[in-house]
Amino acid sequence: MPERTLHEECGVFGAIGVDNAYDVVMTGLAALQHRGQEGCGIAYADAQGELCVDKGPGLVFRVFAQVTPGSHPGRCAIGHVRYGTSGGREADNIQPFAFRQGGEDYAIAHNGNIVNASELKSAMGRRGVLFRSSSDSEILGHLVKMSPHGKAAISAEALSLALNQIEGAFSYLVLTPDRLYAARDKHGFRPLSIGRIGDGYAFSSETCALDAVGAQYLRDVEPGELVTADASGLRARRWSKYRRNALCAMEYIYFARPDSDIEGVNVHSFRKESGRILYEENPVEADMVFGVPDSGLSPAIGYSERSGIPLETGVIKNFYVGRTFIQPTQQMRETGVRLKLTPVRSVVKGKDVVVIDDSIVRGTTSRQLVKMLRDAGARQVHLRISSPPLKHPCFYGIDISSEQELISARLDVEEVRRFIGADSLAFLSEEGLLRAGHRADLCMACFDGNYPTALYSFR
Ligand code: SF4
């Protein structure tokens, strides 16, 4: 069984009202590359106002390697970086998807996971709808076509009716030759921000990509909101009367880049505060503390500041080893982990160390990390996790599909510690996690099993 770590769950970026929107979106997607590396695509209006789509497997600068800056002079575009959590990993599933309705082309890019996808697809299948991909992300386009507005060009009304039939996690960008729609699910699982760029607007899964293109952050798209951007400016409407803030806690813990702000909270600051609280809840005496790159680094700073234990660099990450290197044999998996993470022998030798990591999935990576630190001469290894134990699968677009793969679903903390071989092990509490972001309203379902939506055929 392959080793599992958590993987990011796609990102979307759009721009309208700017020259060379294609180039702007390409830069935005590159800044969102951490959210998906399997494939990417850009839908854009060309100089004649025709909607076109370029996409392919791989990283942004590989897929668009042949693009000359300025060669796509249109003023609106949307893009997507894909990590395949639903629909398999075939090229057909790379977004954006193109549709035609009422004599007008449009394209859709989607970040998230639809929990009633099977039910919707079955119902549409009975009405003769043919899906071109196995991705859930195509569903919105077909729902719009089947709505009472299905014969006319796409509109905010048609989108609102269609969105009301979809349950789950989504941030959608929809592009026509002269309009861009941005919608967020009514629980706000996935982030989506709006920025001002020149006379136009940019939309992004994370604010780090707004910074990358020189856009000024305006606000987040609210849960249950549909925003229309065109030559007249921005207009917002609620597509759902229901609203609950249930942003995915793992966005703060692991997925988002530390320089991003989500719903007014900076990701680095959140993680650093979680490290401070982690020490208050689980103190230990040691010679040094260090984080596992990348998402363990910020909590390690907080742990060090709060405890007074010196901050060190105890493990180095090789950024050039992709997960494709990790093969499904035990030996290759261990080689993969050793290539990805390397202890700094001269730093840890003879020392009692506190290691901060963001989460434990199967536990095998943590076990190898502890072993590598001991082999490098560390005297005691105390593992601290900046999130509560992962006990439940995620149905909202994160790649944790069954309880079987989660060690904390089967073992208590002491049993996990014994499996990993650490001298001590402790997790951040659920209350501590909420306190880190000064929030009372995150999705915590993979920790506490309280899913914000119905789960339909998943259970
Ligand atoms: S279940 Fe966990 S990973 Fe999934 S959306 Fe909720 S907090 Fe995020």
Image (spheres, grey):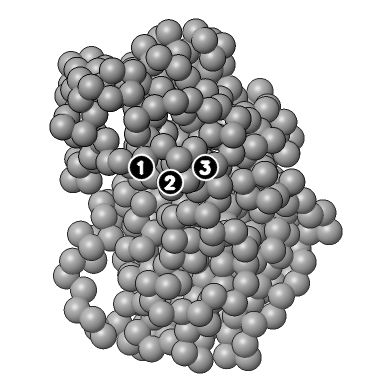
Classed neighbour count for the residue bearing mark 2: other residues with Cα under 10 Å, few (<14), some (14–19), many (≥20): many
Residue 441: percent from left, percent from top? 72, 47
Q: Which residue is mark 1?
A: 311
Residue drawn at x 42%, y 73% as measured from the top left: 211
Ligand 1 neighbours mark 3 (CB distance < 8 Å): no
Kind of residue at badge 1: Leu
Disc 2 is placed on an element classified as helix
Residue type highlighted by circle 2: Ile
Residue named by callout 2 = 301
Q: The disc labelled 3 sits on which kind of residue?
A: Arg
Tell me whether the residue at label 2 lies in contact with that at label 1, contact meaning CB atoms closer than 8 angstroms: yes
Q: Quadrant of the N terminus?
A: top left
Instruction: Report which residue position mark 3 lands on.
Output: 306
What is the x, y in percent for residue 246? 69, 47
Count of marks placed on residues: 3
Q: What is the C-alpha distance between the residues marked 3 and 1?
A: 11 Å
Q: Does the CB distance between marks 3 and 1 fall below 8 Å?
A: no
Query: Quarter of the image holding residue 454?
Result: top right
User: Does label 3 or label 2 sit earlier along the sequence?
Assistant: 2
Query: Is residue 214 rendered to the left or right of residue 397?
Result: left
Q: Position of residue 402 (x, y in %)?
A: 52, 22
Label ID, residue 119:
none
